Image (tube, rainbow, N blue to C red):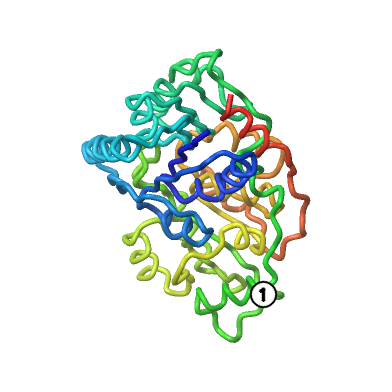
Amino acid sequence: MKIWIDLANAPHVPFFLPIIEQLEQEGHEVILSLRDFNYTVELAARNGCQGTVIGRHGGRNPFAKVVDLMSRTKGLIEFARGQQIDIAVSHNSYAQTIAGRLSGIRVVTIMDYEGQPANHIGFRFAHKVIVPDSFPDKDLKRFGATVQKTYRYTGYKEQLYLSSFAADPNFKRQLEEACDLPDSWNHEKTTLAVVRTPATMAAYHPKSSPTFDRLLEALDTRNDLTVVMLCRTDQQREEIRQRYPDFHIPKHQLDGNNLVYHADLVISAGGTMNREAAILGTPAYTVFAGALPAVDANLVKVGRLTRLETEQDLDKIEFGKKVPGNTLQNSNLCQEIVHEILQ
């Protein structure tokens, strides 16, 4: 069969790499489309994924988002025309879901976050919806995902690619070069804190996060930390550089899984990086300002993730060198999801 995968955001790249490999091993042809957003194109190229770049992020403005959705949908319909595609699959790419439906292609969408308003589009247009078992029933129903077209898998989507993760022994040198770390920096003695900024451009995220602002101020007062800041936008990068000149912003993209693995703690206002840390055994803290996703709530419940809701919660952060933990394995997840895509 001919499978069309749309990579609309950077986390989609590592997620789909094992799926692409599995599909090709089974003799299927895979074609890719990509959105020019959040290093998606660069990350795909670094991993040998070639595809057609169509569209970019519409920004936070709701009207601009609608215009972007319509424009990218049109571009994806033109991309699919005459390709004889059997299945269109994405991690909830709304534009591809609509384009696939309008093109008469069977559509599969995968999603793990019930707080995304645009699930109404992805779930209603898709022929099959694949979600983790923690995804709330009530949200599946309100988004239009019927029981008949929904498949639940056990665990977390990040396990699909982290179950086979192997650390890069040369990563420390790569980190030093990308962040211009001084010669005096010693990873063995200094606590490495990786911090991810909020997705302020996303429809599901509030415009501000007071707790995150207090967090940065608290981190800036400590002299026992090396803080690596991962910013989502140029505006965020400029603000961090001006307000916190001692923080280190990578000059280019680093391998996120290795960064999380080598960190002593990860604090993120998003979801994917926190879950990656939790799965790899790195202490993880979430300052997500919206409703906590069910998958994250489950990690909090099992003690793999700590939530920081208020300024007082910042006292929960444990600084110091991490004790290596066990990886949460789910080695069969890739094959399981590939099987469901093809059904």
Q: In the picture, residue 191 is in which quadrant?
A: bottom right
Q: Position of residue 23 (x, y in %)?
A: 60, 40
Viewer-side residue, 96 vs 110: 96
Q: Which residue does the image show at 41% across and 48% down from the upper left?
A: 199
Q: Position of residue 205 (x, y in %)?
A: 39, 40
Q: Position of residue 129 (x, y in %)?
A: 52, 25
Along the horizontal axis of the image, is 317 left or right of 303?
left
Q: Which residue does the image show at 36% across and 60% down from the upper left?
A: 236
Q: In the picture, residue 222 is in which quadrant?
A: bottom right
Q: Which residue does the image show at 70% across and 75% down from the upper left?
A: 189
Viewer-side residue, 298 vs 209: 298
Along the horizontal axis of the image, is 199 left or right of 261?
left
Viewer-side residue, 320 vs 199: 199
Quick check: 261 above or below 110?
A: below
Quick check: 184 above or below 62?
A: below
Along the horizontal axis of the image, is 149 left or right of 159?
left
Residue highlighted by disc 1: 187
For badge 1, the amino acid type reads His
Along the horizontal axis of the image, is 255 left or right of 88?
right
Q: Position of residue 300 (x, y in %)?
A: 65, 39
Secondary structure state at the residue bearing disc 1: loop
